[in-house]
Image (tube, rainbow, N blue to C red):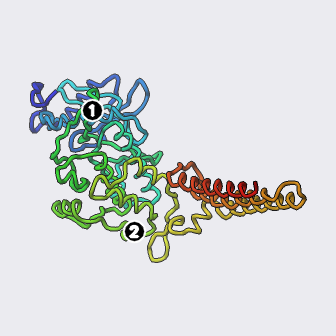
Amino acid sequence: MSGDTDQTPLPKPGMKSADELEDILREELTPELQVVRRLGRGSMGDVYLAREETLKRMVAVKVLSPRLARDSQARARFEREAQSSAALEHPNIVGVYRVGRLSNDLPYIVMQYVKGTTMANRLKAQGPLQVDVARRVIAEMASALQAAHKRGIVHRDIRPDNVLYEEETGRALLSDFGIAAILARGDSSQPTRITRTGELVGDPRYMSPEQLMGNEVTERSDVYGLGLLGYELLTGSGPYDATSKREMFTAHVHHEPRKLSELRAGIDPELERVLAACLNKKPEDRPSSGDVHERLTDLSTGEVTPVPGGAARSASSGDVFGKMKERYLPQIMLVYGAIGWGALEVSSQLVEMNVVPNVLYKLVLVAVLTGLPAVLIGAWFHGKKGRQRFRAIEYWLFGVLFLVWLVVSTVILIGWL
């Protein structure tokens, strides 16, 4: 398996290895796969577009570069990518269908073909993303990382180059698990760590403080990468005013990130808080990938529109009345007010007619008064279109209101008895 022991002849210096490699692919992958063309070349290998004849679908075939064939570390990372990706099934992770080796012992991966481009290329061509698009991409990456973290896999290289953007659907997909770390498990049936503490692998611009310091890398290191990714998608640059590698190292380890709202107007305060939390220096102070996904999914997707002076302003952020209208709070309050008033009128009439005791009116009044904030809380958290999740604060608020209703109603009934 190791490239150090390979005996198969490899392309000689000066030969057109790329052309020879493509010829080998066409010859050896036929008839299962029909190689169409080369899509691109990365740091570790070439990627080709191919047609899988059996399932009538387009796939991408990634082959380790011949110049790295005898590099045992490169081979290990390439195979690690196949193992890590194949262990994950998620709509926002590039899927791996199968792996294999060519006759010259070069490993290859048959993977999902994503028709689109990388986020890095999109940023270069179009500039920063719209706020709602960037928020959705970050949420999708958080969801992808959550799935990886549940399997004990840390990506370790979250950056725009490793996020693919599917043109047809607008979906973002995480790729390149080549330097992923497999977290050690107590269960012997699980994979053990295959990266070493102190090993510095990746681009320093996108590394967490603990990675740069050579400390243990955990799932929260990927969360730090999410924060960096968010800044770049929204501003076109990182959170630190640094250019050289030395300045970048110092900034990641010691400096506080620039405020997102100072780099771009119209940012939802909650989005800014989430990304700032991701960039906390201490891993234990950062949220989990699942927390990031939940908080960003709950955010409003208000459209960012230009305002005079070239600034951007969100139609749904920083505007309490706008958020109330979005959640239909005025309409809900009117409807509830009408129902509550009707209930009180009916109970009052029944008391005057001696049909029911006076205590009923008091109980209805308590129910109406405690029900109003309960309805407003429900509307605030769930009044928007689409499905919203319950959050812990809702349970606390509803619990307090229920307790108030129960205690007051009990006191009224005891006094009446």
Identify the residue at the far right of this view. 353
Q: Quadrant of residue 135?
A: bottom left
Look at 18% across and 26% down and name the residue there: 105
> How many numbered circles does the render carry?
2
- Name the residue tied to disc 1: 186
Of the two numbered discs 1 and 2 on the same chain, state the one appearing first in sequence. 1
Q: Quadrant of the C terminus?
A: bottom right
Q: Quadrant of residue 224?
A: bottom left
Q: Identify which residue, 404 or 280, lies in the foreground.
A: 404
The x and y percentages for residue 346 are 83, 58
Give how far apart the Cα atoms at labels 1 and 2 are. 43 Å
Position of residue 67 in the picture relative to residue 179 (left or right): left
Q: Identify which residue, 400 or 394, lies in the foreground.
A: 400
Q: Quadrant of the N terminus?
A: top left
The x and y percentages for residue 120 are 32, 53
The local secondary structure at tag 1 comes to loop
Q: Which mark is residue 261?
A: 2
The local secondary structure at tag 2 comes to helix
Up-down relation of residue 356 to residue 175 (above or below): below
Look at 37% across and 34% down and name the residue there: 59
Position of residue 38 in the picture relative to residue 11 (left or right): right
The x and y percentages for residue 34 are 34, 28
Position of residue 303 in the picture relative to residue 204 (left or right): right
Badge 2 amino acid: Ser
The x and y percentages for residue 393 are 51, 55
In this rendering, does residue 36 appear at all?
no
